[in-house]
Amino acid sequence: MTPSISYQLHRILRGSIPFWISLFLIFLSVVPLRITGFATVTPSFLMISVFYWSLHRPYLLPAPVVFLLGLIFDILTGTPMGLTSLMLLVVHGIAVTQRQVFVGKAFVLSWWGFFLIGAGIAVFSWIVACVLELTIIPILPVFIQYGLTVLFFPLLAWCFAVVQSSILKHI
């Protein structure tokens, strides 16, 4: 017996939750706050989302979706097209290939993995920005953004875990 159309639609909608959460985090990242200098050091909520979902539910956030999210972020922020997608695909690729190292282990290990991957992405993004601008850009804002991203990781990971255990447990 085949499942009903409403059941299939419900399953598809529940399966798209990581995409919608990531899209919401993109909009949260680009909302202008009236905090001086915050725009340059806004935590990378999207990178946290991609890392988490790539570890725990990679089939719900596949590489083409990660690429699309990166393009949306680039369009909204004015970043060179494809740059965020490239960095997110690197995060996605590392997380998917190293799942056995992180999944089912202590949270601190996942946080440490994110710490290392985020450091590499931060340095890479700084180098790319310097090359694109043809000058040495101050690295302090990059490190502040990276530090804030690492500090926000546990809070968002906990929120994602709640969503995963309550809404996505049967997908």
Image (cartoon, rainbow, N blue to C red):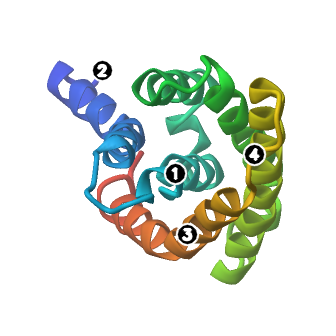
Q: Residues within 10 Å of mark 2 (few under 14, many from 20)?
A: few
Q: Nearer the viewer, residue 146 or 66?
A: 146
Q: CA distance from mark 4 to mark 1?
A: 12 Å
Q: Nearer the viewer, residue 146 or 135?
A: 135
Dot 4 falls on a residue whose secondary structure is loop
Is label 4 in contact with label 2 (beta carbons under 8 Å)?
no
Q: Nearer the viewer, mark 4 or mark 3?
A: 4
What is the number of the mark on residue 40? 1
What is the number of the mark on residue 11? none
Is label 3 in contact with label 1 (beta carbons under 8 Å)?
no
Judge whether residue 106 can be spotted in this image. no
Q: CA distance from mark 4 to mark 2?
A: 58 Å
Q: Nearer the viewer, mark 4 or mark 1?
A: 4
Residue tagged by mark 3? 148
Q: Is residue 163 left or right of residue 78?
A: left
Q: Nearer the viewer, mark 2 or mark 3?
A: 3
Mark found first going from the N terminus, 4 or 1: 1
Q: Nearer the viewer, residue 26 or 52?
A: 26
Q: Give above or below for 107 relative to 14.
A: below
Residue tagged by mark 2? 2
Query: Tag 4: residue type?
Result: Ile
What is the number of the mark on residue 137? 4
Q: CA distance from mark 2 to mark 3?
A: 48 Å
Q: Nearer the viewer, residue 97 or 25?
A: 25
Judge whether residue 144 can be spotted in this image. yes
The picture places residue 168, in percent across and down from the top left corner, at: 37, 52
The picture places residue 58, in percent across and down from the top left corner, at: 60, 42
* Residue sitting at x 80%, y 46%: 94
Check the picture and name the quadrant holding the N terminus: top left
